Amino acid sequence: MPVMAAPGAAATASQLLCWRSLRVVPFLRCAQRTFASQTSGELKVTQILKEKFPQAATIKVTDISGGCGSMYEIHIESEEFKDKRILQQHQMVNKALKEEIKEMHGLRIFTSVPKH
């Protein structure tokens, strides 16, 4: 995530652009993150996907916004995607996360069917 400054000001290491709100905020607000545990947003999205895709072999949700919760990368491997085009698979994920997407800046979706 690039370090950015307010217009007309010099960039400092303590500032980071939080994409969700599109404003400069203190670095620790967005980037406070340990990779050993999931953020509350990651846990929430994961739980919703587990409920909507009970046959999923794998669900991985990663907050790629630096901890702000404004952008996620989602990997889902599920039998429920069998015989569906990629577009249809992604539409299923979008529908499952309809309310959460309203609060997001962006979403990367990767879907697949388990190989036996």
Image: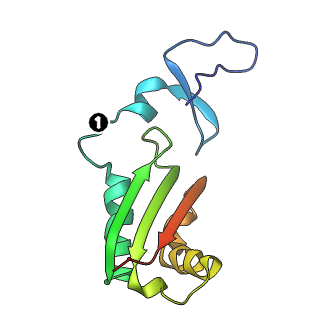
Image coordinates for residue 76, horizontal then vertical, percent: 42, 69
What element does badge 1 sit on?
Answer: loop
Of residues 99 and 61, the one nearer the viewer is 61
Which amino acid is tagged 1? Thr
Quarter location, residue 94:
bottom right
Q: Is residue 7 left or right of residue 114?
A: right
Question: Which quadrant holds residue 84?
Answer: bottom right
Q: Quadrant of the C terminus?
A: bottom left
Q: Position of residue 108 (x, y in %)?
A: 56, 58
Query: Where does label 1 land, which residue?
Result: 34
Who's the residue at 38% across and 55% down the image?
41
Residue 10 locus on image (x, y percent): 66, 9
Residue occupying the point 46% across, 37% down = 66
In the rendered image, the vertical position of residue 37 relative to residue 81, given as above or below: above
Residue closer to the observer: 8 or 112: 112
Q: Quadrant of residue 35?
A: top left
Name the outermost residue toward the bottom: 83
For the point 45% across and 35% down, which residue is it?
A: 30
Q: Quadrant of the N terminus?
A: top right
Direction right: furthest residue: 8
